[in-house]
Amino acid sequence: MILDWRGGEPFSAAELDDIAREVRDAARTVIRGKGATDYAVGLAGARIVEAVLRDVRAVMPVSTVLGGVHGLEDVALSVPCVVGGDGAVAIEETPFSPEERRPLHASAGAIRASVDALGL
C-alpha cells in the first residue's frame, strides 16, 4: 500500500486524496489556462517511446493487458510498469491496500462491461 512505502515522510490518506483530485483535474486546469492540452499527450508519448527505444526500464503508470496482477486477467489498466525494450511489464509486487484494490477492480469491471457491450 502506498501509505506504507518507505523513503521519506509518508503521505496521509487526505494528502493522497488531494493529489488524486489534482491529477484528475489537471487537464481542466491546463485547458482553462492555455486552451488545450495538445503538448502533454505528445510529451507523454515521446517519453514512453524513448523508454522503449533506449531500453530505459523506467517505472511509469501505463496501460497494459494484465495477466494475474492484483487478481486481474485479460483487461488493460494503467498500473505501475517497467517500460523498456521489452515493452511495458506490470510490477506485480506493487502493494495495494483493500481500499486501493476495490476501485482498481471496479475499473476493470467497467472496462469489461464496455468491451462486452461492443461485442468484442
Image (cartoon, helix red, strand yellow):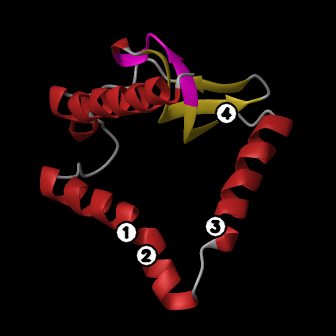
Q: Nearer the viewer, mark 4 or mark 2?
A: 2
Q: Quadrant of residue 36?
A: bottom right
Kindly give the residue lying farthest to the bottom in the view shown.
33
Amino acid type indicated by mark 1: Asp
Q: CA distance from mark 4 to mark 2?
A: 28 Å
Q: Nearer the viewer, mark 3 or mark 4?
A: 3
Please report whichever mark, 2 or 3, sits nearer to the chain's N-terminal start.
Answer: 2
- Rendered location of residue 71, percent (x, y): 35, 12
Please report whichever mark, 3 or 4, sits nearer to the chain's N-terminal start.
Answer: 3
Circle 1 sits on which residue?
Answer: 25
Secondary structure under tag 1 reads helix
Amino acid type indicated by mark 4: Val
Say which mark, if any, is on residue 40. 3
Secondary structure under tag 2 reads helix
Q: Circles 2 and 1: CB distance less than 8 Å? A: yes
Circle 4 sits on which residue?
Answer: 83
